[in-house]
Image (cartoon, rainbow, N blue to C red):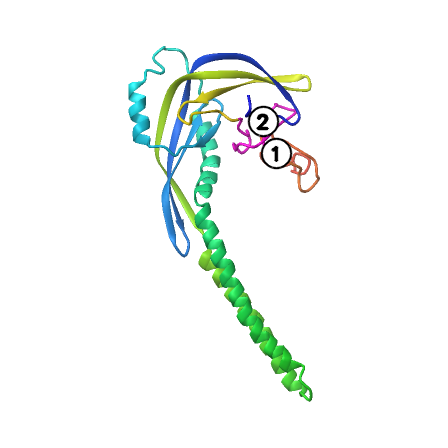
Amino acid sequence: YENVILNNAVYETEKQEIQNVSYLLSCYKYHAVSEEKQEGISSVIINEANLSAGPFYGDIRELLTEGRRGNAGESGEPVERLEIPVVLAALNCIQPRQVLKELEGFTNSLERRLNNDVRRVNEYYGTLMKEIKDKMFMKNLSAEEKDRYFGKMTSQKLELSLKEQDLIDRYSLNISMEPVAFIRLLVETPTLLLRLKRRKESRLFRLAYNPVLKAADSLPCEACFKHDSSYYICDDKLHILCNECFGKCPACGKQYCRACHKAGCPRCTPVIPA
């Protein structure tokens, strides 16, 4: 299985079978407002059993039409699903990242224009301050004249700082999101049961082939729910973690599981008695 690369653990495939799998398609409308405005619909489809998710760029009307023709789920077999608050919590992590990805061209354009405007402002005020500085070092200036030029220099620096802040405020980006639709899709599809092994402990994890995206589920990080090129398995509960969520604490330098310890590093976060 090419999508499973573990840095500190191994896995074995235990069972392959056809099962009914529940996917939830979430559609969010977003508004991005800066000097210009951009809006759109961002869609993500998530496996409700393992929280593996991916962007959906297809036509929802075709998806619904195809779904009405199928007979997935009519076998009466039970369908594994996590509780909906758990699924929605994962989507709340995934959807903002997807929106930022879809706005990448827009944000890159804003950043380029901001940098160009800041550079022009710095060049303008740099020229003014150089002229003042040259005058400050002229011969035969009285102490009063030097103080006056020094005041002008200070004033120009302050004005430059205010201009830069005005530009930052002008190009700042505010993004709002709101859900517009949730569509549950029940599909009959191949699944693969993995046994994740870390030291003497093991854990079962099921992946499926997503017929909507026409790709196999990728392992999700169980702390931030993003997909990574490789993963770590934590020692305590064998959580699947991306490289960032198994990273070192910036304070003490020790690695810890962000899924086990959502409040922060257990060595650095004070324990509040119940």
Q: Between marks 1 and 2, how big is the CA–CA gap?
A: 10 Å
Label count reads: 2
Above or below residue 98? Residue 78 is above
The answer to whether marks 1 and 2 mark residues whose Cβ atoms lie closer than 8 Å is: no
Q: Which residues are magenta?
A: 219-246
Judge the density around disc 2: few (<14), some (14-19), many (≥20) Cα neighbours within 10 Å.
many
Judge the density around disc 1: few (<14), some (14-19), many (≥20) Cα neighbours within 10 Å.
some
SS at mark 1 in the image? loop
- Location of the N terminus by quadrant is top right
The residue under label 2 is 240
- Location of the C terminus by quadrant is top right
Q: Measuring from the top left, give residue 24's x and y in whole percent.
A: 40, 27
Q: Residue at x 50, y 13 (%)?
A: 16
Q: Amino acid at mark 1?
A: Asn
> As drawn, is 194 to the left or to the right of 210?
right
Q: Measuring from the top left, give residue 271's x and y in whole percent.
A: 65, 35
Above or below residue 69? Residue 157 is below
**Residue 250 figure quarter:** top right
Q: Measuring from the top left, give residue 164's x and y in whole percent.
A: 52, 63
> As drawn, is 89 to the left or to the right of 140?
left
SS at mark 2 in the image? strand
The residue under label 1 is 243
Q: Residue at x 44, y 31 (%)?
A: 88
